[in-house]
Image (cartoon, helix red, strand yellow):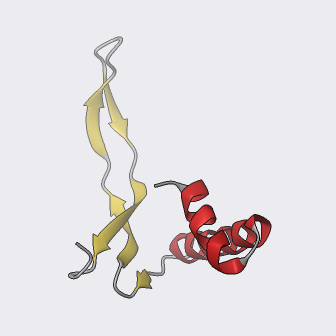
């Protein structure tokens, strides 16, 4: 399922595809902003999204074989709700 599928489902309840697209876009934008600020996003009965910091780690350049250091990064993790599946 992708964003277009979600918009199509929402359009069945909201009436028009334009209204559904605007609503879905606002929801995703709000979730993105909350995660950027370090907040946890919880959707009851579905799951939660939260940001974790990945440590820097050594790696190798596949082309040259020289060692490189991958910098620390922020990643979003999802934990599904117990009753989701």
- Residue lying at the far top of the rendered structure: 64
- Residue found at x 48% / y 76%: 38
Residue 75 in percent (x, y) is at 40, 59
- Measured from the top left, where is residue 20 in percent x and y? 70, 71
> Residue 3: where, in percent of width, then height?
57, 57
Instruction: Please name whichever residue, 35 or 53, is drawn nearer the observer in this view of the structure.
Output: 35
**Residue 61 vertical placement versus 1 (above, below):** above
Residue lying furthest bottom: 44
* Quarter holding residue 67: top left
Q: Quadrant of residue 29?
A: bottom right
Does 6 appear above or below 69? below
| Closest to the observer, 42 or 54 | 42
Question: Dividing the image into 4 quarters, which one contains the C terminus?
Answer: bottom left
Q: Is residue 81 left or right of residue 43?
A: left
Q: Residue at x 38, y 52 (%)?
A: 72
Pinpoint residue 15: horizontal percent, then vertical percent.
Answer: 73, 76
> Looking at the image, which residue is at 67% across and 70% down?
11
Residue drawn 20% across and 81% down?
A: 82
Side of 19 where 84 appears, left or right: left
Q: Is residue 58 above or below residue 5?
A: above
Give the total of numbered labels: 0
């Amino acid at each position: 399922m992708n964003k277009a599928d979600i918009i199509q489902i929402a359009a069945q309840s909201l009436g028009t595809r334009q209204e559904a697209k605007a609503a879905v876009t606002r929801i995703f934008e709000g979730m993105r902003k909350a995660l950027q600020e370090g907040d946890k996003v919880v959707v009851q009965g579905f799951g939660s999204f939260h940001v974790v910091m990945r440590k820097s780690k050594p790696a190798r350049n596949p082309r040259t074989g020289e060692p490189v250091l991958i910098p620390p990064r922020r990643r979003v993790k999802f934990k599904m709700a117990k009753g989701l599946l």
